[in-house]
Amino acid sequence: MALENLDSNTHTWYGSKYGSLSEDNNEANTVKELGKGKENTKKMKDIWNEDADTSKSENDVWKVIQDAGVDLDKWYVPSRAEWAAFGDFCYTKLDPKMDTSNFYTSRSLSGWYWSSSQENSYYAWHANFDDGFTEILNVSSGECIRMGATF
């Protein structure tokens, strides 16, 4: 996981498409499993770029990561399962005696991050570190972006 957020802002997942994301864009194309974040990110970037809808938001994750010059051959938006594994590792594997009440905030992590996993035409998955789980959230909601990488 990257050591810092992509930026200090919150971003929509694909805000203008709330309720109208094509069936071609849903979980058949973006999956929740481990190891799928890189593939999901590339697919959603391509779908976003090919979308001729002029109302799509400049604040969508897929636009923001491109504008930031993120190397998508190396970095990606983690899938739902990748965020869950990261959270589980941090909470249970680093030091079982650690006080986890402020674990994320003390390491400059935000409470919520978008995953690259879409649930349906209304929702995508996000990591909720304030409550310690992943859940679906409206694609027009604002969340932070933190990139993942495999080495």
Image: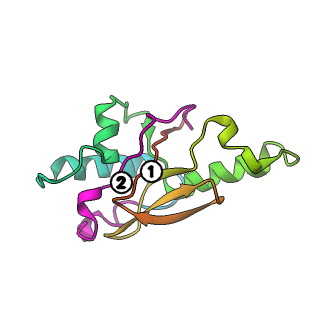
User: Can you see residue 34?
Assistant: yes
Q: Nearer the viewer, residue 57 or 36?
A: 57
- Up-down relation of residue 118 to residue 13 (above or below): below
**What x and y, as percent, mark residue 68?**
34, 30
Of circles 1 and 2, which is in front? 1
Which residue shows up at 35% across the image and 54% down it? 13
Label 2, on which residue?
13
* Magenta part, dominant SS: loop
**What x and y, as percent, mark residue 16?**
23, 59
**What x and y, as percent, mark residue 115?**
46, 53
Asked if the residue at tag 2 contacts the one at tag 1, i.e. Cβ–Cβ closer than 8 Å, the answer is: yes
- Up-down relation of residue 148 to residue 43 (above or below): above
How many residues crowd mark 2 within 10 Å: few (<14), some (14–19), many (20+)? many
What kind of residue is marked 1?
Glu
Q: At numbered mark 2, what does the secondary structure look like: helix, strand or loop? A: loop
What kind of residue is marked 2?
Trp
Which residue shows up at 44% across the image and 64% down it? 137
Label 1, on which residue?
143
Q: Which residues are magenta?
A: 1-30
Which residue shows up at 76% across the image and 50% down it? 101
Image quarter of the N terminus: top right
Image quarter of the C terminus: top right
- Up-down relation of residue 101 to residue 69 (above or below): below
